[in-house]
Amino acid sequence: MSLSLVLWAGLAAVTQSDRLAVTNLRATYGELGPPRADWKIPLGDALHVAFDITGLSTDAAGRVRYRVRLEVENSRGERVFAPEPGEVELLTILGGNRVRENLVMLTGLEQSPGMYRLKLTVTDLQSRAAKRPEVAITQDFSLIPADLSILRIQVTSDRAGQKPVAPVGGVGQTLFLNGVVVGFKRDAQKQGSIQAEMTIQDESGKTVSARPVTLQFAAVPPGLEYVPIRFDLPLSRPGTFRIVLKATDLSANKATSISLPLFVTDVSEYRP
């Protein structure tokens, strides 16, 4: 199974509690993004998994140290993915009793659809117990064939798409929305034709952008299965919004859409 793993530790802080636990396991749209409705992942998409760890031991300076191991099995119980476990050390500067973790598995269009099971094992490396505390959690997910789809959605703070952030920003900031379009048809010359557009809605569902921001891909060459898209998100006023992305396969006259929230704050309104 051609999957790649990236492990990221949130800066949410931790204090020692009575029992090591993994909670709030969920699949998300992008690193730090909103939760998906289910665990059905189109082939070619990125399966982002977020979860909270509680009950980690701290040293005198307030640091925690732990290891996260990921294993993936297919429906026959065969291990198909088991990368080297990642170790994390961080300072719990904000207090509290949780660490938020995110990892990502990149799937490919060539992989086999079907049911899979992931297992996460967290080990408390800071503990001084003779046997270090360890906890495991499992989750079934399915890889499904990808029709026309917008996949690998990720909000970033940089134009190159290398610095993932939550869909949250401040007035005056510019975020960037990244993704790919897959599953489009090709003409007799084996070229595809795609239009991607973005609109912004307010909390009531009213469109607030003057017109859709549109990207045109008139001649997608043979061999290019993932068409990258990127939209700028200049944040000009505070509020709660919804980003609506739409991709149209002009060759097949078919469209698909996806949406996610956007939260904008104005720090100039803060009064100490």
Image: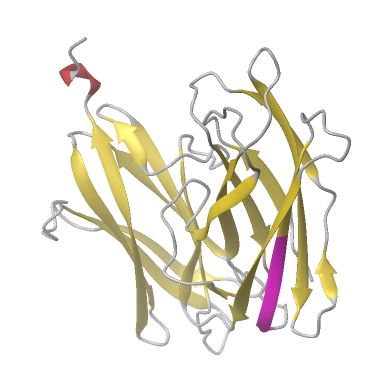
Q: Residue at x 47, y 39 (%)?
A: 165
Residue 115 among those drawn in magenta: yes
Whether residue 43 is visible to the viewer of this picture, yes or no, is no
Q: Where is residue 140 in the image (x, y as percent from the top left)?
A: 63, 74
Q: Where is residue 1 in the image (x, y as percent from the top left)?
A: 79, 71
Q: In this view, does 40 lie above or below 128?
A: below
190 vs 84, nearest the viewer: 84
The span shown in magenta is 113-119
Res. 46 image quadrant: bottom right
- In the current view of this chain or complex, which residue is farthest to the top? 272
In this rendering, the answer to whether 126 lies above or below 43 is: above
Image location of residue 100, percent across then percent down: 55, 41
Q: Is 262 placed left or right of 224 in the picture?
A: left
Place of residue 108 in the rendered image (x, y in percent of width and height, measured from the top left): 68, 70
Q: In this view, does 16 lie above or below 219?
A: above
Residue 269 in magenta stretch: no
Question: Position of 172 compared to 38: left or right?
Answer: left
The residue positioned 37% from the left and 44% from the top of the image is 167
Residue 179 in sight here: yes
The foreground one among 20 and 89 is 20
Q: Quadrant of the C terminus?
A: top left
